[in-house]
Structure formats: structure tokens, C-alpha cells
Amino acid sequence: MFDSLTGKLNSVFRGLSGRGRITEKNIREAMRQVRTALLEADVNYQVVRQFCDKVVETALGAKVIESLHPGQVMIKIVNDELTNLMGPVDSQIFYVSPGPTIVLLAGLQGSGKTTTAAKLARLLLKKGKQPMLVADDLQRPAAIEQLETLGAQLNIPVYSEAGKDPVKVARNGIRQAKEIGRDVVILDTAGRLHIDAELMAEIRQVCQAVEPHQIFLVCDSMTGQDAVNSAKEFNDQLELDGVILTKLDGDARGGAALSVKAVTGKPIKFVGVGEKLDQLEEFHPDRMASRILGMGDVVTLVEKAQEQFDEQEAVKLQQKMAKGEFSFDDFLKQMQSMRNMGGIKDMLKLIPGVGSQMAGLDIDEKEIAQMEAIVHSMTKDERRHPDIIDGSRRRRIARGSGTEPQDVSSLVKTFNQSRQMMKAMSGMGMMGRMKAMKQLSNMDLFSGKMPGMKIKQRSKRKRVDRRKKKRSR
Amino acid sequence: MALFGKTLEKLKSGLAKSRKKINESLKTVLTFGRQIDEDLLDELEEKLISDDIGVETTLGIIEDLRAAWKEKDISAAEEIVPYLKRRLIEYWPHRDRQLHFVETPPTVIMIAGVNGCGKTTSVGKLARYLSDQGKQVVLAACDTFRAAAVEQLSIWSERAGVQIVKHRQGSDPGAVAYDACEAAVARQADVLLIDTAGRLHTQQNLMRELTKIRNVVGRKIEGAPHEVILVLDATTGQNAVNQAKMFTEAVDVTGIMLAKLDGTAKGGIVIAIRNQVNLPVKFVGLGEKPEDIEPFDPETFVEALFS
């Protein structure tokens, strides 16, 4: 389940490359792997079938058969096709003039409507709008209090009233928004099952009464095969304008995104990526495609990294690396920014191929703290020139950081190795660096195997083959 | 007996939609008189996957069917449903799906789950269910994180007519659990139900917090928590398996409450969870009212899916 799709596809084609011929049958075989990957990512069965048929067609047309790297070509086709299906990026909210623009959020129970309402309000506030929240969830106990608390956190007015009539609450809320001059009204409605005729009729009435300018379906990204049923029903009854996907900070592959897009045809506007109110982001179909395929999310990783390093510093760092002047101080800085990036484990998960191996692994944050302590116990000179660390300095550093002298020497050793590698890497051109990166990502980092092992073994086998040939001649 | 009849009706009506859908589709696949062949097995595979049972588990079931067919145990399409019923019920070997109560009360039951899966509602329903059985129940409002979660549970405690121990929002959930244990002992309660904040299983800090709550309770009352119920949203797909794994790792889950089974989702993922994490389902949630809770009965569940 955790094997990445790329690996599986490669194995399908690797078996073939020896024989050197790839047929339509092989492509279909490869598509079985894609199909399984999509199903395991919770994409709806029907959607998967249509998708796979389409990809086979494209693949045959694109002459994967003649390609040197059929596995990669296939992945690209699958990835592009997925991206196209879920795209394009459309996080626009249309405003009406004169206001207020009315936005209604609907969805199943527990999909995250109330939190999303507050997140959306915060986003609008950031864009210079004057949003107001209306607590139209009169079903769930304390839903009104929840929205009021969130509104207070954001300093945004929340309209609520005691009563049982959501139509009246919505109307009054909008009236008040006009009176106090708010230009966007966000209606938080009660969670409801798409087959609950009574509650679906009720939300239709709300829509008829206040005619919202935009209706968004809030959908939990962990939803399984049933996502198509609820999305279709909501879309049929309410004519949705878009979808907001929530709880993407978990490890669900999020196939529901594809299913919902496929059955409603409505764009996915935003994604919720955490419990904090600023954690609502634009939807990126390309990243979602990689996620559904289990290929890791490189773009997010890079973006997160960019947030942490400012560019000048990065350039400086690169120069230092090239000259081999990378010091323990830089090392420390990097450690700290890695931590800021939201935990090493979270970050490693985003790297292709690594994500799948992270399942049982727990990186010990304590070890990192220990490394930091060791560096902190070094003098400025030692940090810049670790070579001067001798036995007595080592003992002092160990005492200062509460570690053993061998911990200090192993850190210095690791540091020297990585410094050499950096120097080597920055000496390479773009292509060389890519190669090195690839080797890095191919590395079976966590099972203790060395990266070069596999390659070596293969070359040995080839040599044996050749020898055999010679003999047979 | 009458009560059980009601249970069956409720579960059946809750599953009516899904059953109808499944029946319709199964009927078209399993038309009377049709013989089993590879095409039919393919179609059946699609149905099972559409129930969120998962690729791996579905393939297992299909392999069994194929073997039975090759060995001539079954040959006609109409034999498949009874066979599947037997096969699926095997996934739930007879094992106590009831809550275990300790001899010296209070029995401590902890509820955990991801955000929005229905924990607080489930706690409310469980409180009502247990107090209907004559147990004295105390609730602990350990979801101090989400806005108004404490208020929500307070309303449920009034509905169920049980006591509640709560602190302000933002306070330490471990402290609430501690106080609740003392209160439960002092008031000689039979059951202490601990509601916790929703957390995604991937958030290690929050998972550690959960472990901490469990440890606090364990130090206060011997052997506690005696039951740890993971609440699962029936609409959840394959990710539920990961949830079950991670929560079990953090707090030794003893059983599942399958919430929101009154929709069109079939909750087939619990079959995969039974297979991979070996957790029984103890209760199902079928609505928003306090009485919309039933003990899980695998035969009814399977019957409602396939009959």
C-alpha cells in the first residue's frame, strides 16, 4: 500500500526492458498498477475506470512503446491527465457591487464547515474585505458559540439569533450586514446528509430566500468512494460554484478531490491544511496529482524551504558550500530552519520516494537537540575550523553539551563528510547536480542499505552475462 | 426481543439506501440463473471496492470466491451472496463486542478520533445509552482546544442527564482528565467517559498529548482507561486504516464506533481494519439524536449490506 507508484511502474517496465519490447498489453498491465494506486487513494471506481481508459488511449498515441523510459513517460501522462482533470487553478471569489457578496458553505456533518467559514473570513479580511459571519447552523449543539468564538479571535462580527428557522437567520444576518456596511457575508450552515430530504429542502429554501452569489461545498479529503454520491446530490440541489477540500494536513491521499471534480465539474477553490485559522490555501492541481499518485509533493517542499531561507542568505550559503567554507554555524542555522519548517518528519514526507518509507519511521528530534547542544558548546574558532578539535577540546565540548566525546567526534565526522559532498555538488553543472539529487532520492536512506548497492549488483550481473557469452562463443 | 427488533429495523433503515443501491447493482450482476465466470467476478470486485472495503481486502474476497468456484462449492450467481455473507461474518469471529466493565467502578472509557468524525456526538449518545442501562455516568470534557467544544458536550450532558467535569477552553486536557477521575471516584460513578479533542493521526505532538491523557488517567485509576474507543466516520476511505493503526499505537484502541452510518456510505473500511489492525467494531452511530446508537452486530451489518 505504501509503495510508490513510480516504483511499481518501473518494476513493470524493468521486467520488460531486458526483452526490449513493450506492447499495448504491457501498457495495460502498467495501467493496472495505476488503477490500484488510484483506488487506494480513494478515487471513485467509476472515475478511475474512465480515467484509465483515457490514459491508455493517450499513451498509445504518444508512442510510449518507442520511448526509452516508458515508465517515466507513463507517469508523466498519468500525472498530466490528473492535473488537467483537477485544474485549472481558480481561487477567485467574485464580488458583487453593490455588496454584500453572499457566500454559503454547505456539506456533510464534520466536514469542517465552521472552521472553514472562519478561515475564509480571515482570507477575505487579508484581501481588504470586510467580512461578516452568520451562524446558520441551528442543529448542532454549541455550533453558534463555536462560530462566535472564532469570530472574536478574528475580530469579525458574527450574526446569530436564537430560533429554529435558518431562512430567517440568514435573512436577518444579511440585513444586518448591509446596515453595518460589511461587504461579504459568509453563511455557515448545518451539516446534513445528502439523503436527508428534509434538511436538503431546508437548505434549498435558504438559497432561494437569500440567493447566495457563491455556494461552496466543504468536503473532507479523507472521504472514500461515497464522495461522489454526496457531491453529486449537493450539486444537483444547490448548483455549487466550487469545492473546498479540508483536512489535507493528514496523510490521506485525497482521491476524493478527483472524484468530486469529476462528478460536479466544479473547481476546487481552496484547501484546508491545518487547525489554525490561517491554514487555508489555494488549490494546486499538480501537487494534488502527485499526492494522489503517492509521489510526494516536491513543490510544497520547495516553497516551505523558500519561506525559511531568505534569498540572500541562500546565495551566501551556496558560495560558502562551493568553497568548502560551510561552518558549524551554518549547519546550526540550517538545523533550526529545518525545524521551523514543521518538523523533520513532515518535511521528509514530501520528498518523492521517501514518503512511502516514512510509514514506520520516527526521526528522533532528541538527537537533533543533542547535535545543537554540541555545536553550542564549541568556540567560534572550532565552529569555523572543526579540524582543530582535538582530544582535549572534544572532552570539553562533550562536558559542555552533556554528551560523550564519541558523540562529538561522530558529529564532526558527519559534518566533514557532508561538507565535502556539498563542495562536490556545487562544483557540478546543473545536470550533474540533478544526477546527484536523483541518487540521493533513490537512496534507501532508512533501511541502512547503501545507495550504490543496487547499481553495483546490476552491473555485476551484466558482466557475468558478457563473460558467459564469451565462453559460449 | 422487541428492542432487538427495533435495533434491526433502525440499522436496516439506516442502511436502506445503501442496501437498495447495493442490491440493485448486485442484482444486475447476480441475476438469477447466471453462472459464475470471470466477468462476473470482475463486476463483483467493482462492487466491493465501491463499498470502501479496499483493494487488498476485496482481492482477498474475490480470490476466495474464485477458489470456491473452481472447487465447485458454488456455481450459480445466486449462491454468491450467502457465500459472501458467511465469508464476511468470518471476519468478525465471535468475540466480545460489548464494553468491558471493571469490578470496582468507575470503568473509564476514552474516546478518540480525527477532527469532525463525530466524537462529541458519540460521547453524548454513549452517555445516554449507558445511563439508560442504569449506570451512573460522568463525562470529562477533555476537548479544550476546539472553540465551544466544552459547551457542546455540556448540552449533551443535559440531554443525557449525566454529570460533567469541565474546565475553561484552552486549559490542559490532562488536568481535566485528572479532576474527572477524582470526581468519578468521589461520586461513585459507574462509568467515566472521556471526550478528547479531534486530532489528525499524523500530528505527533497531539498524539503524544493523547498518550499523556491516557497516562494521567492510568495513574489515577488502576488499569484505566479500560476501553479506548476510536470514532470513525463511515464515509472515510482507505485512510481509516492509517487512523486505526496510529491511534492504536498511541493509546491502545480497544474498539471502534462507526459513526454516520445513516448516509449512503457503507463503512466497508471496517472490514479492512478488522483484517489489518484487528479491531472490533463495538457501536454504530445512525443519526444526530441521543438514541441513534446501536451495539454493532456483524450479522446485521453484513445482512444489511448484502441481503
Image (cartoon, helix red, strand yellow):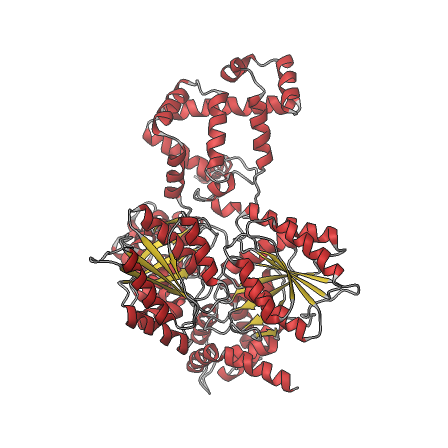
Q: Position of residue A257 (x, y in %)?
A: 37, 59
Q: Is residue A331 above or below residue B7?
A: above
**Of B292 and A150, which appears nearest the observer?**
A150
**Of B100 and A285, which appears nearest the observer?**
B100
Q: Position of residue A27 (x, y in %)?
A: 35, 57
Res. A200 image quadrant: bottom left
Number of numbered discs on residues: 0
Residue A213 visible within the image: yes
Q: Is residue B251 above or below residue A464?
A: below
Q: Position of residue A117 (x, y in %)?
A: 38, 57
**Side (left or right) of B124 relative to A73:** right
Q: Is residue B93 above or below residue A129?
A: below
Residue A28 visible within the image: no
**Side (left or right) of A473 relative to B201:** left
Residue at the far left in the pictured view: A97
Residue at the far front in the pictured view: A179
**Of A380 and B155, which appears nearest the observer?**
B155
Residue at the far right in the pictured view: B104
Q: Position of residue B56 (x, y in %)?
A: 52, 62
Quarter of the image with the C terminus of chain A is top left
